[in-house]
Image: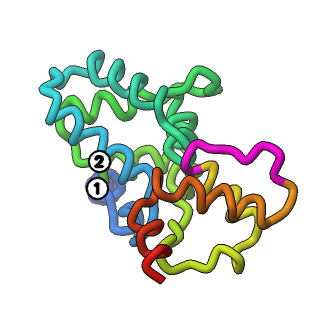
Amino acid sequence: MLCLSGLSVALALSLVPGAAEALKEGECEVCLTFLGRFYQQLKDSGTKFNSADIEKELLKSCGDAKGKDNRFCYYIGATSDAATKIVNEVSKPLSHHVPVEKICEKLKKKDSQICELRYDKQLDLTSVDLKKLKVKDLKKILEDWGESCKGCAEKSDFIRKITELMPKYAPAAAKARTDL
């Protein structure tokens, strides 16, 4: 009988989430940010907190997602080209107002790639010297703005295009450059 109660205690302890399962600082950045924003949108819009409505809204949000947010949506199966579908692992807990951190912890167990996603560092265009950036970084700036540089062959072409578009996408940076 003693052995059976020891086994019960061991089983009970294994079911309690430990500190090892908690997210570490900086882990699951995209998951936490995307779902946090999404949850806030749900609350602000007055959407009913049932699993089906949340899933529908999630699919809609993921349809507009770009970059790392789109990759996150792909991993949870909320894009049309996704191979797996674990959207219910997000919609059901959200319908019960489970904290986003707990949802991301659970998603990490299902697919560790989800918590490996990180946002790219944003350049401070007010102070960065465009001439010192690599062409790859210049292309990334244009891509983030949803622009392209057709016919750009030289680094100077990309710099010219960014400078030309700066008032539209980064007005503070454009103003700072004219003040110099």
In the image, is residue 105 part of the stretch drawn in magenta? no
Q: Position of residue 111 (x, y in %)?
A: 55, 45
132 and 89: which is toward the camera? 132
Please report whichever mark, 2 or 1, sits nearer to the chain's N-terminal start.
1
Query: Which residue lies at the image location 57% right of the left edge and 34% below the top edge?
Result: 74
Q: Are marks 2 and 1 in contact (CB under 8 Å)?
A: no
Which residue lies under the disc numbered 2? 36
In the image, is residue 148 part of the stretch drawn in magenta? yes
Q: Is residue 153 left or right of residue 158?
A: right
Q: Main secondary structure of the magenta part?
A: loop
Which residue lies under the disc numbered 1? 16
Q: Is residue 28 left or right of residue 38?
A: right
Give the class, few, some or many, for how many residues have Cα within 10 Å of label 2's Cα (few <14, many ≥20): some
Q: Position of residue 93 (x, y in %)?
A: 27, 35
Give the class, few, some or many, for how many residues have Cα within 10 Å of label 1's Cα (few <14, many ≥20): few
170 and 115: which is toward the camera? 170
